[in-house]
Image: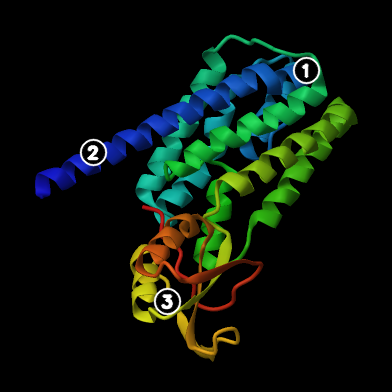
Amino acid sequence: MSGESETLHIGAKVKRLLLIVLAACIFAVNIKTLVRAGGLLPGGFTGLTLLLQESFSRFLGIKLPFSLINFTLNAVPALISFRFVGRRYTLYSVLMIVLSGLLTDFLPAYPITDDILLSAVFGGCVNAIAISFCLFAGASSGGSDFIAIFISEKYGRDAWNYILVGNIVVLAVAGLLFGWEKALYSILFQFTTTQLLNYFYRRYQKITLFVVTNHTDAVFEVIKVNTHHGATVFHGHGCYNHAERDLVYSVVSGDEVRRVIPKIKQVDPAAFINVVRSKQVSGRFYLRPND
């Protein structure tokens, strides 16, 4: 059993590394093709890095490598994340930052369209795919993600609005320096990325489960084992067939729903399950820690 467990552990590590390498490649190719072709600014430290690169080149005649600026900006947030968020999470994130930065510097530029609208829409889609692979690997693309997750998990506050304000400031500076058209298209790029990320990655979404069942203990055991969340049971009366029914109420993370529902149906094929998106949850809510 120990040998099998070790093999699974190694396989998980290899899968994690492959996802990060794939994410870094897609991320860098997107910058060298669609982002640079449209003169767009992605959100976070990537956008700030491109803004500083362009500013140094245009106003000072100095061509700085993407990786040099990006590594410098990420140094302090990475240290904070390593100390307070998770060590492996941070190390895998640093690997993503290093690989994507070096690939961005060394891959040749290959603009595939001169249409800025196409660059904004499809560049945002490709950016979301790259970040999703990174998130699935239990890492991030660094920068503002380090800061937002640190604030969210350390203080229980939603920091993404602050990150949005920071992105707006970067776009405002870009608009003043280089023209408002590309800054406005960059907003479309960021919007596309955000919408797809919300669809692909649901760790921070809260989902309410209402399960009508006659197998309360078995259903709760599935929820507890697979999500580490608790539940509350309400006793009721079925109006259609006038039978006694139990309602199991629980709130889980968005990425846990897909694996929990089939297992509930296994223990009770007749269970009636209602899935509701929860906008806000106040109180103790278990969130799987970053490693």
The residue type indicated by label 1 comes to Arg
Left or right: where 229 falls relative to 147: left
The answer to whether the residue labelled 3 contacts the one labelled 1, judged by CB atoms less than 8 Å apart, is: no
- Helix, strand or loop for disc 2: helix
Residue picked out by circle 2: 10
In the rendered structure, find residue 58 and report the number of the disc placed on it. 1
Left or right: where 223 falls relative to 10: right
Residue at position x 47%, y 83% from top? 232
Residue picked out by circle 3: 230
Between 45 and 96, the one lying in front of the other is 96
- Helix, strand or loop for disc 3: loop
Tell me where residue 167 sits by quadrant: top right
Tell me where residue 162 sits by quadrant: bottom right
Residue 278 x %, y %: 63, 68
Residue at position x 55%, y 48% from top? 201
Task: Say if residue 150 shows up in the picture.
Answer: yes
Residue at position x 57%, y 42% from top? 143
The residue type indicated by label 2 comes to Ile
